[in-house]
Image (tube, rainbow, N blue to C red):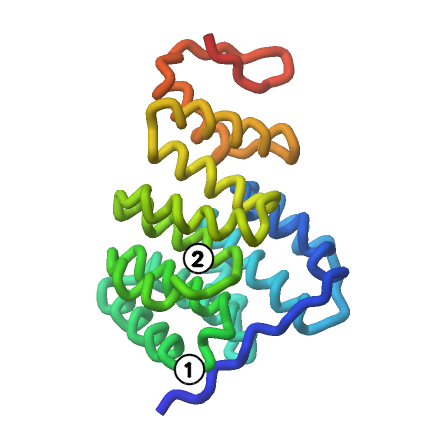
Amino acid sequence: PASAVPNAPSLDMATEEELFGLRNAFHLGNYTQAVSEANSVHFSSDAARAQRDFFMYRAFVEQGQYRVVIDEVGASAPLACQGVKLLATYLQGTREQKDMVVMQLKEWASDPSAQQNWQLLLMAGTVLLHEQDFKEALKLLHQNPQLDVMAFVVQIFLTMHRADLARNQLKAMQEQDDDATLTKLAAAWVALAEGGEKYQDALYEFQELSEKYSTSVMLLNAMAICHMHLGRFVCQQDRHSSFGWL
């Protein structure tokens, strides 16, 4: 039998605030900035360091730097980071290696205590989404109240072309934290999927995030998609190096 899965350590409000820059950069697709934030902030608690490493290694994965994660995350690393290492292994692995990763993550996630470790569940769900095993991914994640997990459930529903279910999940996120970056992003992606007059709503959300924080390739691409759906195909670069659409 699998050994009990350690719970994800809880963080106090002060530490959450210190991690905000790192988490926000990651969610907005500014992965280089996220790594820089992770390396410039020093925390005294193990819980904070574990969160920092979790987002930092995920940023490396998003940049395609799988080998960095595989080499740096050792056997004594927190389980959340072990989950990121398995994701990196999956993404660069052979079919046989992918199957081994799926089996390992399913074993860990099946432990009753795994519901308290949202980072592990998120990594398992990410791999299952790559496998297009939507049913198993939702089974693991759909009842978890962590905002990061709720946003990922929105992503799963959108991948399934179920904008109606994504909208319902978004409403739950808005009830929990309407001002969170993840909630704003989820609202934009849902509006984009719904189409029609919602394209303008999606564009406003992406523009607001870009102006409030900093832009990224992800946000620029999303805004470009909105503009194209709105019939605006001519782009000119203005003196601030942002993009104006005609």
**Residue 105: quarter of image:** bottom left
Q: Amino acid at mark 2?
A: Tyr
Query: Residue 245, position in %: x, y?
Result: 48, 12
**Residue 193: quarter of image:** top left
Task: Say above or below: 61 vs 158.
Answer: below
- Judge by depth and name the residue closer to the eye, 30 or 122: 122
**Residue 11: quarter of image:** bottom right
Total numbered badges shown on the rendered structure:
2
SS type, badge 1 = helix
Q: Residue at x 38, y 32 (%)?
A: 192
Q: Which residue is mark 2?
A: 66
- Judge by depth and name the residue closer to the eye, 93 or 177: 177
- Judge by depth and name the residue closer to the eye, 75 or 187: 187
Is 163 left, or right, of 10 in this rendering?
Answer: left
Query: Residue 238, position in %: x, y?
Result: 58, 11
Query: Residue 91, position in %: x, y?
Result: 35, 57
Q: Nearer the viewer, mark 1 or mark 2?
A: 1
Q: Which residue is mark 1?
A: 112
Q: Residue at x 61, y 64 (%)?
A: 51
Q: Amino acid at mark 1?
A: Pro
- Marks 1 and 2 sit apart, C-alpha to C-alpha, by 29 Å
Residue furthest out toward the bottom: 1
Question: Could one spot residue 25 in this view of the protein?
Answer: no
Mark 2 nearby-residue class (10 Å; few <14, some 14–19, many ≥20): many
Task: Say above or below: 122 vs 210.
Answer: below
Q: Residue at x 45, y 47 (%)?
A: 170
Is 34 left, or right, of 200 in this rendering?
Answer: right
